[in-house]
Image (cartoon, rainbow, N blue to C red):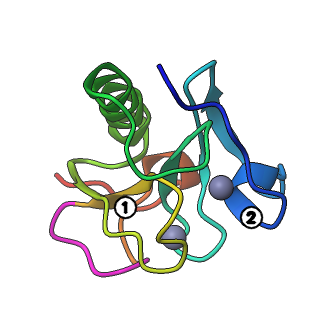
Amino acid sequence: MSHGTKSDDCDLCEAAKITHWFHEDDICWIAECEVCDTPMVVWRWHGTEPDSVELAHMQSALARVAESVFDGHYVDDNMRNIPDHYHAHARPAGGFFGHGRRKDKGGPRRP
Ligand SMILES: [Zn+2]
Ligand SMILES: [Zn+2]
C-alpha cells in the first residue's frame, strides 16, 4: 500500500468524535454524519482511491452498521462536501435525505 498521508486541514482526517461512533479499526471509522444523521464510513487516509481490499472492507463494515440502524439501506459514495477524502454514507432505502427510519432511535418500524 502506498498511501499513509493525512491532511492538516481536512475535517475527515481530523476525525473529531463529535457524533456517535459506531465502529473504528485500522482501515476506517464509521460515525454518524453530523449533517445527514446517517452512518458514514471514512477511510483512515487522505485520498480518494482506497485499494479494492480496503474498499470491500469499508463497504462490509458500513453494511453491518447500516443493518443495525435501517430496515434496508443503500450506499451513497457521492462525496459532495469533501471530494478529496474517501467516505460513503449509508442512506435508508426508499427514504429521503436525512429522513429515514432509525431502528436505534425508536422510530417506527415496518409491520
Ligand atoms: Zn452527511
Ligand atoms: Zn482527509
Q: Quadrant of residue 21?
A: top right
Q: What residue sits 31% from the left and 19% below the top?
A: 53
Compared to 18, does 41 lie above or below? above
Magenta region includes residue 72: no
- Taking 44 as reference, is 88 left or right? left
Q: What residue sits 59% from the left and 63% below the top?
A: 33
Specify the principal SS of the magenta part.
loop
**Which residue is more in the foreground, 42 or 73?**
42
- Residue 64 x, y percent position in the rendering: 37, 28
- Residue 58 x, y percent position in the rendering: 39, 31
Callout 2–callout 1 Cβ contact below 8 Å: no
Residue 11's mark? 2
- Residue 14 x, y percent position in the rendering: 81, 53
Compared to 73, does 26 lie above or below? above
Q: What residue sits 68% from the left and 40% below the top?
A: 5
Q: Which residues are magenta?
A: 93-98
Q: Nearer the viewer, mark 2 or mark 1?
A: 2
Q: State the separation of the CA atoms marked 2 and 1.
A: 33 Å
Amino acid type assigned to the residue bearing label 2 in the image: Asp
Amino acid type assigned to the residue bearing label 1 in the image: Pro
**Which residue is more in the foreground, 59 or 105?**
59
Where is mark 1, residue-wise? 108
Q: Is mark 2 within 8 Å of ligand 2?
A: yes
- Residue 88 x, y percent position in the rendering: 40, 54
